Amino acid sequence: MGAYWPFLSDHEIKLLHELDLADESEHRFRPVFIPYTFVLDGERTIHKVYNGWWDMGRPAVEELRMDFRAILSQRPDWEYNKD
């Protein structure tokens, strides 16, 4: 099929510290990494960022649908023209 799926891999956990995604305030389980969800457009530009735990910061399916709709509405072929 020829699909290309980029993945971010940071097995040495360097990038998480560089992006300041580590919460050092938790003394027992230090560091705790804050979960983020990035919505990217076709050019891999960040459209929206969600952060948080469980259901208090993660995007709902409806929120992601609306984000993708907003991204797709920027395409020149979004509206149907009879021309």
Image (cartoon, rainbow, N blue to C red):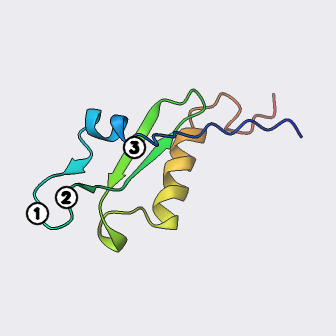
Q: Amino acid at mark 2?
A: Arg
Spatial distance from mark 3 to mark 1, Cα to Cα?
Answer: 31 Å
Residue beneath label 1, please? 27
Quarter of the image where one finds residue 14: top left
SS class of the residue under badge 3? Answer: strand
Name the spot of residue 63 as percent of width and height, x first: 46, 60
Name the spot of residue 40 as percent of width and height, x first: 51, 38
Residue beneath label 3, please? 48
Horizontal arrangement in the rendering, residue 65 relative to residue 14 (left or right) = right
Q: Nearer the viewer, mark 3 or mark 1?
A: 1
Q: Residue furthest right?
A: 1
Checking the image for residue 14, the label placed there is: none
How crowded pointer 1 is (Cα within 10 Å; few <14, some 14-19, many 20+) is rated as few
Spatial distance from mark 2 to mark 3, Cα to Cα?
Answer: 28 Å
Quarter of the image where one finds residue 27: bottom left
Decide: is 15 above or below 69.
above
Q: Which comes before the other along the chain, label 2 or label 3?
A: 2
Horizontal arrangement in the rendering, residue 76 relative to residue 81 (left or right) = left
Q: Residue at x 60, y 32 (%)?
A: 42
Quarter of the image where one finds residue 19: top left
Q: Are marks 2 and 1 in contact (CB under 8 Å)?
A: yes
Q: Nearer the viewer, mark 2 or mark 3?
A: 2
Q: Which comes before the other along the chain, label 3 or label 1?
A: 1
Q: Are marks 3 and 1 in contact (CB under 8 Å)?
A: no
Residue beneath label 2, please? 30
Q: Amino acid at mark 1?
A: His
Horizontal arrangement in the rendering, residue 26 relative to residue 79 (left or right) = left
Q: Nearer the viewer, residue 31 or 44?
A: 31
Name the spot of residue 30 as percent of width and height, x first: 19, 58
